[in-house]
Amino acid sequence: MSDSAIAYFTEDDSVAAVTGRVGSDTDPRLAKVMNALVSHLHAFIKDVELTQAEWAQAIAFLTKTGQMCDGNRQEFILLSDVLGVSMLVDAINNRRPDGATENTVLGPFHVDGVPEMQMGTNISKDGVGESCLFEGRVTDLHGAPLAGARIDVWSDNAEGFYDVQQPDVQPQPNNRGIFVTGEDGRYWFAGIKPVSYPIPDDGPVGQMLGHLGRHPYRPAHMHFIVSAPGHETVIAHTFVKGDDYLRSDAVFGVKKTLIADYEATPDAATAWRSTFDFKMVPEAAT
């Protein structure tokens, strides 16, 4: 690109000055994303007339956010979550027809390598909490059962912590399991009724929530990843109906269709029962 083709930077022409430097051989998708990013970012700065002190504070905030990240914690994902960005990206990439089970965010505490268990197994290894039977069916959109569906589940403990947050306190893996459906598409397993809990709020993201007058809590939920041959994988939570934080989830993960009934039972072995069916979309339909 010749010097004459490069715009000099001015307040009015700031976007053109920056996007004009993008080379002609740049990957088209990268060029589209970066040009849009620059355009929206510059428009935001002009709209609020960002001060130099505020700019410096933003740089410090992002620096601290990066410094909080390690192998067990991703503060940038947390930032994305509380700004609704994670859920928006998920919604755009998981559009499904009416009647299909909706997606929500994966969350930071999924663990690979959990062994497959016999249907009906109790995933609570410490036995602490209100026992609960989780059951339902995995079907296609027409209600036909799906055999061989893999159900990966996990939840917090009775104190609101996942096992990876307390490796020296909870048995590993605790409140996690993998089950595979039979010909009837049914699943059932025992665990505990999940409880609401705060996201990690001891870092810059938590401080930001405090300044905005927002709480850090997530409503109680059981995590599911449901996959079946020939069908789109579903990543979902089943939220406890009546939870205080359903309408103010810190990461905006609640969808009405994912709110599940948790019914008290007379069974001493499982004090609660939650039934939820998963309706899967064929891969070719998305």
Image: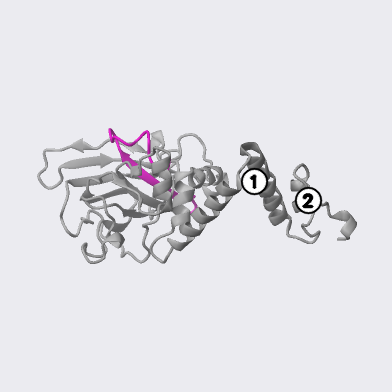
- For marks 1 and 2, the one nearer the N-term is 2
- Identify residue for label 1: 41
| Mark 2 Cα-neighbour bin, 10 Å: few <14, some 14–19, many ≥20 | few
Left or right of 239 on screen, residue 235: right
How far across and how far down the image is residue 95, in percent? 54, 41
How far across and how far down the image is residue 182, in percent? 33, 53
Q: Give SS at disc 1.
A: helix
* Distance from the alpha carbon under mark 1 to that under mark 2: 15 Å
| Residue appearing at x 23%, y 66% in the figure | 168
Q: Nearer the viewer, mark 1 or mark 2?
A: 2
Relative to 286, is 149 above or below? below
Q: Is residue 144 visible?
A: no
| Residue appearing at x 54%, y 46% in the figure | 89
How far across and how far down the image is residue 183, in percent? 34, 51
Seen from the viewer's position, the closer of residues 183 and 236 is 236
Span colored in magenta: 230-252
Left or right of 5 on screen, residue 78: left
- Identify residue for label 2: 9
